[in-house]
C-alpha cells in the first residue's frame, strides 16, 4: 500500500506541484432491508480505489482511479498534477499547504467482527425486529426494517510525510413502521448506530427498537397538528443535537472563511450566545459513529470547542483551512469515499450539558411546546437561516405535558436563536445520523441535553 | 465501448445463472465527469472523475440478491456475482415478485441525449465558462461587498442493461451544469442566492445570463423582514413549485409508495384530487430532456404517462415489480442512481402544463400574500402535511412585491394545496426536479416571527 501511495505522490511532485496526497480505500458494505416481512433488498458492495489530489499556489486538482497498480498510480498522479498546473494562473490567492506529519497504523478492536456473524444470523435479526414492530399492535399496517454494516480500511499518505492506516466499522439498525387508523396514517423512524462490531446490535436497546418505533407510531395516531405561531420551545436531546449540528456546526466549518460564506466570519473570539452555552465536536469519543483517530488527510483528531462559555473559539479545519487561516489543524477533514475530496466536516456534535433539571425546565413554562426527535433539517450558512422539523412534540400548558402534536417545524436565524436559549438541562444523549455537504454523506452523531428557547416561530397547518 | 459494456454484463448474467440464479440482471455504468469550482470569485479546484462499475441482481425463485463493485475487473465482477447469488439464497421470498422484465417491446427513439461537444469539451473552454459566469455576476455587484461561488460540471457516460430474459440495451448521455452563487454583505445583513443552467445541449449554455440573474436575485433578498402571519395566498415560482410538486407530489404517485400505503394519495386513483387547472405528465420521450431515455433502469422501454388530467388522478409511476403486483402496464419508471443500487421508482421529466400569465401577472392579482421563490421542504409523505420555510420568499401587498421575508413558514396539507391551485402561469422553467411554470395556491397558513 505504501509503495502504491509513494508512486502516485512521486509522479505528482515530479510533474511540478508542491503538495500531493492520496487515499486508498477498500471498503465493504452489506445492507439487508425487509418490508412487511419480506426481503426488499439484500445488498453487498465493495468500494476499491484511490483518490489523488495535487496542489500548487492555491489551485487544487483531484482525480480518482480504480487501477491500483504502480502504473495506475503513476499515470493518475501525473494527470492530476497537470490539471492543477493548468489552473494555477487563475486562482485568487496564493498559499502553501503545511501541517504536522503523522505516521501510525491504527487497529480498531471490536468484540464481534461482522464476518464472524453469518449472513443468516443477520437476516434473522432484521426479521425479528420487523416482526416485533408488526406484532406490537394491529394498527401497524406496514413495517420497514434496515440493517447496514460498513467496514473499511483506508491508507492515507501525503507529500509532507504523513502515512496513516485506519480501520472503521459501523453497524446500523433502522425501524420505520407505519400505523393507520381510519384515514389517519403515521410513520416514524428510529435507529441505532455506533462505531463497533455486531455487538452493538445485541444490546437490549437495539434488540427492542422495533417495539419502540411501533409504540411511537401508535401514539402519533392520537396526535394533532400544531397551530402555527410564536412559542417558547424545549428541544429534546435528539432535536437539540440536530439543531446544534445544522444551525451552528456547519457555520463553523473553516472552509466557509476563505469562501466568505458564513455569518460567523467576523465572530471568532466574540460572543455568539449566553455565557452558559457551550457547543463541541468531538471525534475522539470511543465507539461513536463520527469518531476517528485521524482524519482523511491523516491529521490526528482533537476535540473542538466551537463555543466555550458563549464565545466562538474553535473552527473545524482541513489542512488547507488551518494553513490559510494560520490556525492549528484539528483533524476535521473527511470524505465520503476515495471518490471524494476531503472537506472540513463535523464528527460527534453536541451542546454541552447545563445545570437545569429537565422536569424543572418544563415546569417553569406557561405555554409552549416540547419538540422531540426530527424528520429532517437544513441550514444556509451564508444567511444563517435554518429550518427543522420535529417528528413529534407535546404542548406544554402551565408546566404540564399535554396533547401530542406532530410534524412541527421550527425556523430561525443562527445568531438570533442562540441568544434566545435560556435554560440548558443536565441530561445528555447522542444519536446516530448522516450528514450531507456538497454531495458527500458521512456518518455522524448529534445530541446534547434538553434546552429551552424563548419565542421562536413554529410552523403548523 | 458499447460492445464492451454489453459483453461484461452478458458474462455476469451467464455466471449468475451457472451459480444457480433462475433470473439475473447486470447493470454496467461507465462515466466521466469534469468539474471546476470557484470560491471567492476565483478558480479553486478542478476534478476529473472516471467511474465504472457493475451491479448484479440475482433471483432464485422469489428470493432476490444484489451486489455491486466499483471496478470492472474480472475478479471483482466474479466476487460481486458470487455475493449476489449468496444473498439471494438467504433472502426471505417476496410473494409479490413475478419476474424481471422481458424483451417483448421495441424501444422508442429519443433525440438529443448525447452531445459530443460536451463529452469532448476541452478543459480550457470549461475554465473560460466559469470565468465568464463570475464576471457577469461581478458586473452587477460592482461597488458592493461580495463573494461569488461558481461551478461548472460536464459529464458523459454510458450504461448497459442485460438480463436473462433477453433484455440487452445500452445508451449514452451527456449534460453540463453551470451555476453562480453570490453572497452579498451589508453592515447588518448578509444573503445569498443562485442561478443555474443544466442542459444536454452545449449551445444553450449562457454564462452571462446565469451570472447576471444570480446577482440580481441575491440583491433582491437584502433586508428581509418578518411579517404578520395568517391565512393568505401563496405564489410558487418555478423553483419553489418544483420542490413541492417535483418531490412532494411525484413521490406520492410512485406505485411502490401507494402499494405500501405510505402515500397521502393512496386509494385516490381516478378521483379528482386537484383543481381542474392542474395537468401533469411524466414524459420520458421529450427531446434532450434531462430525464429523457429510451429505456429505464431495468431495460424496459420508456414512455409518456399522464398523471393528472383536469384535476383527476389518471396514472401512477411503475417499475416491473409494482406493475406485476398490480397486474397493470409497466410505465418504465424504474430508476437507480447508477450501478450502485437496486431499481426504485422515479419520474423522468415531470411536467406541469402551462396556463396563462407571467410570474409578475400572478403577483399583480394578489391583494396580500407571499411569494415562495424557493423552498427546500417536502411534505410528510404519509400524511401530506407540509411546513415549508420560505428559503427565498417575498411579501406581496396590493399586487406588488414589498420586501423579502425571513423566519417565515407556509403550512398546508398537500391534498389541500393541490385542490387550491387557482392559477397556473406560462413561465415554464426546467429545474433539476421538474419542468414547471409558477402557480398560485389560493390560501395557506403563514407563520412568521
Image (tube, rainbow, N blue to C red):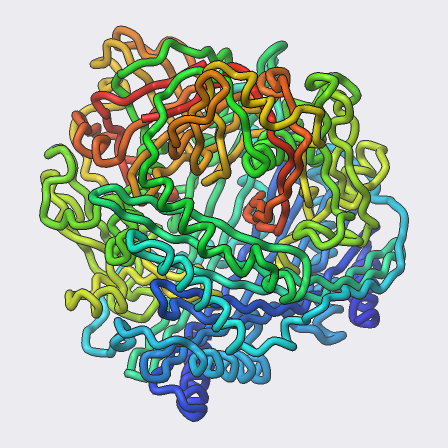
Of A181 and A85, the residue lying toward us: A181
Q: Is residue A162 above or below residue B206?
A: below
- Judge left or right: residue B378 versus residue B322: right
Single out the residue that lies furthest toward the bottom: B18
Of A398 and A182, the residue lying toward us: A398
Residue B94 in sight: yes
- Judge left or right: residue B392 versus residue B311: right
Of B420 and A309, the residue lying toward us: A309
x then y, percent, for residue A95 = 81, 38
**In the rendered image, which quarter is residue B59 located in?**
bottom left
User: Which residue is rendered at x = 45% and y = 80% of the image?
Assistant: B90
x then y, percent, for residue B135 = 56, 28
Q: Is residue A73 above or below residue B236?
A: below
User: Which residue is rendered at x = 69% and y = 19% of the image?
Assistant: A272
Callout count? 0
**In the rendered image, which quarter is residue B292 located in?**
bottom left
User: Which residue is rendered at x = 50% and y = 11% of the image?
Assistant: B223
x then y, percent, for residue A310 = 74, 20
Q: Quadrant of the C terminus of chain A?
A: top left
Single out the residue that lies furthest toward the top: B398
Residue B149 in sight: no
User: Which residue is rendered at x = 33% and y = 20% of the image?
Assistant: B371
x then y, percent, for residue B32 = 53, 61
Amino acid at each position: 500500500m505504501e509503495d502504491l501511495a509513494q508512486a502516485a505522490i512521486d509522479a505528482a511532485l515530479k510533474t511540478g506541484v508542491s503538495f500531493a496526497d492520496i487515499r486508498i480505500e477498500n471498503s465493504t458494505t452489506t445492507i439487508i432491508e425487509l418490508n412487511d416481512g419480506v426481503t426488499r433488498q439484500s445488498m453487498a458492495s465493495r468500494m476499491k480505489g484511490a483518490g489523488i489530489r495535487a496542489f500548487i499556489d492555491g489551485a487544487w486538482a483531484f482525480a480518482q482511479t480504480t487501477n491500483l497498480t504502480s502504473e495506475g498510480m503513476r499515470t493518475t498522479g501525473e494527470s492530476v498534477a497537470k490539471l492543477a498546473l493548468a489552473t494555477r494562473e487563475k486562482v485568487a490567492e496564493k498559499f502553501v499547504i503545511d501541517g504536522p506529519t503523522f505516521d501510525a497504523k491504527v487497529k480498531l478492536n471490536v468484540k464481534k467482527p461482522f464476518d464472524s456473524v453469518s449472513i443468516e444470523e443477520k437476516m434473522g435479526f432484521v426479521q425479528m425486529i420487523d416482526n416485533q414492530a408488526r406484532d406490537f399492535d394491529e394498527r401497524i399496517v406496514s413495517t420497514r426494517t434496515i440493517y447496514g454494516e460498513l467496514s473499511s480500511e483506508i491508507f492515507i499518505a501525503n507529500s509532507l510525510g504523513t502515512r496513516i492506516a485506519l480501520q472503521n466499522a459501523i453497524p446500523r439498525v433502522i425501524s420505520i413502521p407505519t400505523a393507520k387508523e381510519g384515514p389517519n396514517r403515521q410513520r416514524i423512524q428510529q435507529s441505532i448506530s455506533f462505531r463497533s462490531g455486531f455487538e452493538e446490535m445485541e444490546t437490549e436497546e437495539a434488540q427492542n427498537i422495533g417495539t419502540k418505533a411501533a409504540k411511537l407510531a401508535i401514539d402519533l395516531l392520537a396526535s394533532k397538528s400544531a397551530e402555527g405561531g410564536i412559542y417558547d420551545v424545549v428541544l429534546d436531546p435528539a432535536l437539540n443535537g440536530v439543531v446544534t449540528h445544522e444551525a451552528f456546526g456547519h457555520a463553523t466549518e473553516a472552509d466557509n472563511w476563505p469562501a466568505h460564506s458564513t455569518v460567523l466570519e467576523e465572530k471568532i473570539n466574540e460572543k455568539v450566545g449566553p455565557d452558559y452555552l457551550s457547543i463541541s465536536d468531538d471525534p475522539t469519543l470511543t465507539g461513536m459513529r463520527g469518531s476517528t483517530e485521524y482524519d482523511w488527510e491523516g491529521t490526528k483528531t482533537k476535540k473542538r470547542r466551537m463555543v466555550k462559555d458563549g464565545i466562538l473559539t474553535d473552527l473545524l479545519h482541513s489542512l488547507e483551512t488551518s494553513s490559510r487561516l494560520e490556525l492549528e489543524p484539528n483533524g476535521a477533514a473527511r470524505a465520503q469515499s476515495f471518490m471524494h475530496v476531503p472537506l472540513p466536516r463535523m464528527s460527534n456534535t453536541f451542546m454541552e450539558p447545563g445545570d437545569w433539571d429537565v422536569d424543572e425546565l418544563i415546569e417553569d413554562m406557561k405555554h409552549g411546546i416540547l419538540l422531540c426527535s426530527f424528520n429532517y433539517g437544513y441550514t444556509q450558512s451564508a444567511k444563517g437561516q435554518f429550518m427543522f422539523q420535529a417528528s413529534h412534540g407535546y404542548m406544554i400548558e402551565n408546566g404540564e405535558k399535554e396533547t401530542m402534536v406532530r410534524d412541527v417545524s421550527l425556523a430561525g436565524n443562527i445568531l438570533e436563536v442562540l441568544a434566545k436559549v435560556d435554560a440548558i438541562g443536565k441530561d445528555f444523549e447522542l444519536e446516530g445520523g448522516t450528514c450531507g455537504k456538497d454531495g458527500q454523506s458521512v456518518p455522524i452523531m448529534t445530541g446534547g441535553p434538553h434546552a429551552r428557547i424563548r419565542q421562536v416561530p413554529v410552523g403548523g397547518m | 465501448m458499447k460492445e464492451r459494456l454489453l459483453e461484461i454484463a452478458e458474462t455476469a448474467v451467464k455466471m449468475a445463472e451457472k451459480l444457480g440464479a433462475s433470473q439475473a440482471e447486470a447493470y454496467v455504468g461507465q462515466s466521466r465527469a469534469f468539474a471546476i469550482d470557484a470560491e471567492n470569485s476565483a478558480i479553486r479546484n478542478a476534478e476529473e472523475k472516471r467511474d465504472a462499475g457493475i451491479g448484479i441482481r440475482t433471483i432464485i425463485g422469489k428470493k432476490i440478491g444484489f451486489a455491486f463493485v466499483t471496478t470492472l475487473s474480472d475478479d471483482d465482477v466474479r466476487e460481486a456475482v458470487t455475493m449476489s447469488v449468496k444473498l439471494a439464497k438467504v433472502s426471505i421470498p417476496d410473494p409479490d415478485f413475478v419476474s424481471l422484465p422481458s424483451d417483448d417491446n421495441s424501444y422508442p427513439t429519443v433525440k438529443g441525449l448525447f452531445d459530443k461537444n460536451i463529452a469532448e469539451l476541452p478543459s480550457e473552454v470549461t475554465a473560460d465558462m466559469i470565468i465568464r459566469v463570475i464576471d457577469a455576476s461581478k458586473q452587477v455587484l460592482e461597488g458592493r461587498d461580495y463573494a461569488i461561488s461558481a461551478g461548472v460540471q460536464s459529464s458523459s457516460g454510458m450504461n448497459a442493461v442485460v438480463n436473462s430474459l433477453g433484455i440487452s440495451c445500452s445508451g449514452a448521455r451527456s449534460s453540463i451544469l453551470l451555476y453562480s452563487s453570490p453572497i452579498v454583505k451589508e453592515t447588518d445583513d448578509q444573503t445569498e442566492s443562485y442561478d443555474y443552467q443544466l442542459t444536454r445541449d452545449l449551445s444553450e449554455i449562457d454564462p452571462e445570463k446565469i451570472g447576471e440573474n444570480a446577482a440580481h436575485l441575491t440583491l433582491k433578498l437584502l433586508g428581509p423582514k418578518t411579517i404578520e402571519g395568517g391565512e393568505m395566498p401563496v405564489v410558487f415560482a418555478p423553483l419553489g413549485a418544483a420542490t413541492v410538486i417535483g418531490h412532494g407530489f411525484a413521490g406520492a404517485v410512485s406505485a411502490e409508495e401507494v402499494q405500501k400505503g405510505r402515500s397521502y394519495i393512496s386509494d385516490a386513483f381516478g378521483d379528482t384530487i386537484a383543481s381542474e387547472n392542474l395537468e401533469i405528465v411524466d414524459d420520458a420521450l421529450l427531446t434532450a430532456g434531462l430525464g429523457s431515455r429510451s429505456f429505464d433502469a431495468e431495460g424496459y422501454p420508456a414512455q409518456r404517462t399522464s398523471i393528472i388530467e383536469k384535476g383527476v388522478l389518471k396514472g401512477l409511476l411503475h417499475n416491473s415489480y409494482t406493475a406485476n403486483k398490480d397486474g397493470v402496464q409497466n410505465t418504465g419508471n424504474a430508476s437507480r442512481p447508477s450501478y450502485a443500487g437496486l431499481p426504485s421508482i422515479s419520474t423522468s421529466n415531470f411536467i406541469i402544463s402551462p396556463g396563462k400569465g407571467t410570474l409578475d401577472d400572478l403577483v399583480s392579482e394578489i391583494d396580500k400574500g407571499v411569494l415562495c421563490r424557493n423552498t427546500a421542504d417536502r411534505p410528510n409523505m404519509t400524511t401530506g402535511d407540509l411546513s415549508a420555510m420560505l428559503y427565498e420568499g417575498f411579501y406581496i401587498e396590493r399586487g406588488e412585491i414589498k420586501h423579502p421575508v425571513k423566519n417565515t413558514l407556509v403550512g398546508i396539507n398537500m391534498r389541500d394545496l393541490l385542490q387550491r391551485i387557482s392559477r397556473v402561469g406560462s413561465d415554464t422553467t426546467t429545474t433539476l426536479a421538474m419542468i414547471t411554470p409558477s402557480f398560485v395556491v389560493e390560501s395557506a397558513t403563514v407563520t412568521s416571527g
